[in-house]
Image (tube, rainbow, N blue to C red):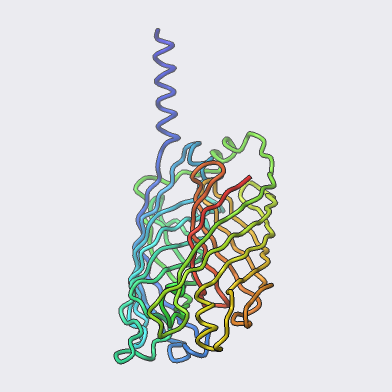
Amino acid sequence: MNKLYYTLLLISIVSCVFSQTEKSFSIDYNTGSVFAHDKDVENVGGSTTNGIELKYTFKRLDSLYHSSFNGFPSQGFAIGYTDFNNTILGKGITVNYFISPNITINRWLSTAFNFNVGAAYLTNPNRPIANPNNQSYSTYISAYLAIGWETKIAITKRMIFNLGASYRHTSNSGVKLPNKGINWTTANFGLTYHTTNPVNTKNLKKRFNAHKHTNKNFWEFSLFGAIRNPDNESPTKYGIAGFQLQHNWQTARTHAFNVGTEFFFDNSLVKQIKIEDNKSSIGLRQGLLLGHQFLWGKLNFGQQIGFHLLNPENKYDTFYHRWTFTHKITSKISAGISLLAHKQVANFADVRLVYRW
């Protein structure tokens, strides 16, 4: 009976240890510069940005978390304030979710890559009379994306000094024009406080990675849809619908490379061609895709370069890029969002359903 008692107690203690959740709170100051990615936004290029950001970060240290993300990435939520120091752009508040794979160098030093997706509230959108020179955004609410890198230096076991850089972007994805978007780079520094002593996950990774992993090749078929304006004046939004087929070669637990194609009917382009060229078009676009996916268990993050095969009236650049986030609903079905952009200008953001086999 005593052996059973102590066995159950030991299992309970081990379960508590490995279901431990690390939590931390951060405050960062950032400064940067808006760059003019298009001639229409040269009036805001070079604007100096200043901002502050508060972050809540967490990660669990159990086998379920490890299997869900193929590792122990940090994730969390952030709220930030940015002053663009330009009367045309105004100010912004961002709210976002982030995931951050970490690389531990030693007990005092680590580095991390941050991937952020969320929303931005911008104070001074384009208005024909009040702010006609703002070609960057025309809605108060926009999507917000950011990619960054950080070095973390431990001051004490729980207090960390952060130093990093990031690329940030806001866009309403063509829902309302003009929508050239805001693109800016930042440098940041700040402090992070851990509520408990951080755990070195190296031994946990060895334990959970002990079983043999087999790389898999797989197919994905996606159905997607979006809406956008055909020009700056039109109040009506038109639909975009299509499908994507791609083959993926998994090269490691968290990496896969892919090649694919997509077809979609762009009714906003049909209207745009009618307005600008007085021509009829079916609005069919096709592209070839080549890219990569991070396979973080239930979360996938894809980056692809596209090449237009069908591009009615050559309204868009030959090359484009896609950024896709999906979340697994079942082992075969995922749902998510994808942004298609030409250079630094977003064309549209779609919602999609993905089937994998």
Q: Is residue 266 above or below residue 84?
A: above
Q: Residue at x 52, y 60 (%)?
A: 224
Q: Residue at x 56, y 53 (%)?
A: 105
Mark yes or no: residue 171 visible. no
Q: Position of residue 272 (x, y in %)?
A: 51, 82
**Nearer to the camera, 235 or 182:** 235
Q: Residue at x 68, y 54 (%)?
A: 247
Q: Residue at x 43, y 22 (%)?
A: 10
In this rendering, position of residue 357 left or right of residue 224: right
**Nearer to the camera, 231 or 188:** 231
The quadrant of the rendering that contains the N terminus is: top left
Q: Position of residue 273 (x, y in %)?
A: 55, 83
Mark yes or no: residue 247 visible. yes
In this rendering, position of residue 118 left or right of residue 204: left
In this rendering, position of residue 64 left or right of residue 321: left
Q: Is residue 43 above or below residue 280?
A: below
**Nearer to the camera, 298 or 242:** 242
Q: Position of residue 285 (x, y in %)?
A: 62, 71
Q: Is residue 337 above or below residue 236?
A: above
Q: Count every numbered label the image shows and give the total.
A: 0
The quadrant of the rendering that contains the C terminus is: top right
**Nearer to the camera, 216 or 244:** 244
Q: Is residue 99 above or below residue 11?
A: below
Q: As drawn, which residue projects farthest toward the top?
A: 1
Q: Position of residue 41 (x, y in %)?
A: 47, 88
